Amino acid sequence: MLVPMAEERQLNRHGGKRVKGVQADGISMPQHGTSRAYIISRLKRENLLDLVEAVENGKISAYAIAVELGWAKRRPTFSGDDSNQAKRRAWALRKIFDPKALIA
């Protein structure tokens, strides 16, 4: 079943009542993994709306937020944390998660 792009599905609560012999309908978790849509839906479900706003404004990627929250694991690179990209990502995360940056 295809869902139109304009219509965004909401994630249901994690878990729920289990009935023996009945399989899930696939609606409670329509997407999974590291897709941007799934991460944003999960952030909304967890009521982390400030992070949703940061992702939608382009301040940081949804994947970087997922890695920071422990929902995804970043693949190792040759340069590790010394690359400019890693430093840029760390600076953006510091601005988002630092309470002093929110005041200024």
Image: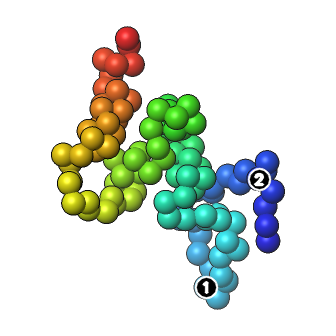
What amino acid type is highlighted by mark number 1? Lys
For this view, does 93 lie left or right of residue 56?
left
Q: Using the image as rendered, state which of residue 12 and residue 100 is in the foreground.
A: 100
Point 56% across, 47% down: residue: 40
Q: Using the image as rendered, state which of residue 57 and residue 77 is in the foreground.
A: 77
What amino acid type is highlighted by mark number 2? Met
The answer to whether residue 24 is above or below residue 57 is below
Q: Using the image as rendered, state which of residue 58 and residue 8 is in the foreground.
A: 58
Residue 38 place in picture, x, y as percent: 57, 56
Residue 54 place in picture, x, y as percent: 50, 33
- Residue 90: image tag: none
Residue at image mark 2: 5
The answer to whether residue 57 is above or below residue 68 is above
For this view, does 104 lie left or right of residue 10?
left
Image quarter of residue 44: top right
- Is label 2 or label 1 in front? 2
The secondary structure type at the circle numbered 2 is loop
Point 71% across, 54% down: residue: 9
Residue 12 place in picture, x, y as percent: 63, 57
Point 40% across, 57% down: residue: 71
Residue at image mark 1: 20
The answer to whether residue 52 is above or below residue 9 is above
Residue 39 place in picture, x, y as percent: 52, 52
For this view, does 92 lie left or right of residue 32?
left
The secondary structure type at the circle numbered 1 is loop
Earlier in the chain: of badge 2 and badge 1, it is: 2
The answer to whether residue 19 is above or below residue 91 is below
Residues marked 2 and 1 touching at CB (< 8 Å): no
Quadrant that contains the N terminus: bottom right
Point 65% across, 82% down: residue: 23
